[in-house]
Image (cartoon, rainbow, N blue to C red):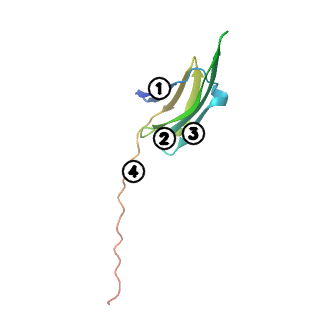
Amino acid sequence: MRVEDYLDGDRYVVRAELPGVDPAKDVRITLTGENLRLDVVRRESHADKVRTEFHYGSFSRLVPLPAGLKQETLRAAYADGILEITATVGETEPTAREIPITVEHGGAH
């Protein structure tokens, strides 16, 4: 499965080539922490007068998501053999914060 991902302004885009699959039955997209997991099962056959060929198998890809991705904006669409997943990317919130120290005056030891 060939996959590309890129930022287009404030929009994050993942595109995967998936010709010959039924996205409703054969594709599962899962958000796992800070990654997208694509699981695909290919069930394709080609027949002519002499023989039949089967192309099948399952495969998966883990795509790391960029910082600041707004998970609630994730959308997926499939057209012409291409799965496209998009989401909005906003400002990243700082993960470091200072913790104040409380000074306590205890009794003598």
Q: Position of residue 67 (x, y in %)?
A: 41, 40
Q: Earlier in the sequence, mark 3 or mark 4?
A: 3
Q: Image height check: is 2 above or below 39?
A: above
Amino acid type, callout 2: Asn
Identify the residue position indicated by label 1 in the image: 2
Q: Earlier in the sequence, mark 2 or mark 3?
A: 3
Cβ atoms under marks 2 and 4 closer than 8 Å: no
The alpha-carbon separation of the residues under discs 1 and 3 comes to 18 Å
User: Do the numbered discs 2 and 3 sit on residues whose CB atoms are within 8 Å?
Assistant: no
Q: 78 or 11: nearer the eye? A: 78
Callout in the foreground (1, 3): 1
Question: Marks 2 and 4, Cα distance to the nearest angstrom?
Answer: 18 Å
Quarter of the image containing the C terminus? bottom left
Badge 2 or badge 4: first in the primary sequence: 2
The answer to which of 36 and 87 lies nearer the viewer is 36
User: Disc 2 versus disc 3: distance between alpha carbons?
Assistant: 8 Å
Between 3 and 14, the one lying in front of the other is 3
Name the secondary structure under disc 4.
loop
- Residue where numbered disc 2 is placed: 35
Closer to the chain start, of discs 4 and 1, is: 1
The residue wearing badge 4 is 95
| Amino acid type, mark 3 | Thr
Q: CA distance from mark 1 to mark 2?
A: 17 Å
Residue 98 is marked as none
